[in-house]
Image (cartoon, grey):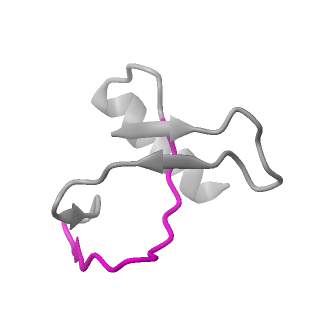
Amino acid sequence: MLDYINAIPTDSGCLAKISIPQNLITNYKKTIQYRTGLLFQAEIITENLNLLERLFYNLRKMVN
């Protein structure tokens, strides 16, 4: 859950504070061991997409 987002972007994006669930699981169903100081990169998708559109979006992202 997004707790805070900085209104002023940096060169590499926006700084945000999030709450994460107990288990960190990737899209490929791999569990990540949580450690203090882990850095994450996230993409926030605000569009309602159906499954086919999401697959196409991921495919297009891999090609670029």
Whether residue 15 sits left or right of residue 29 in the image: it is right
Secondary structure mainly formed by the magenta segment = loop
Quadrant including the C terminus: bottom right
Q: In which quarter of the view is residue 7 placed? A: top right
Is 24 a magenta residue? no
Residue 51, how many percent across, how many down? 29, 31
Picture mark count? 0
Q: Residue at x 57, y 37 (%)?
A: 5
Residue 31, how many percent across, how many down? 20, 73
Is 41 a magenta residue? yes
Tell me if residue 17 comes above or below residue 41 in the rendering: above
Tell me if residue 60 comes above or below residue 49 in the rendering: below
Q: In which quarter of the view is residue 22 placed? A: bottom left
For the residue pair 63 and 39, the one nearer the viewer reads as 39
Quadrant including the N terminus: top left
Residue 37, how many percent across, how many down? 46, 76
For the residue pair 10 and 56, the one nearer the viewer reads as 10
Residues shaded magenta: 29-44
Q: Residue at x 50, y 70 (%)?
A: 39
Residue 44, how many percent across, how many down? 49, 38
Q: Residue at x 44, y 75 (%)?
A: 38
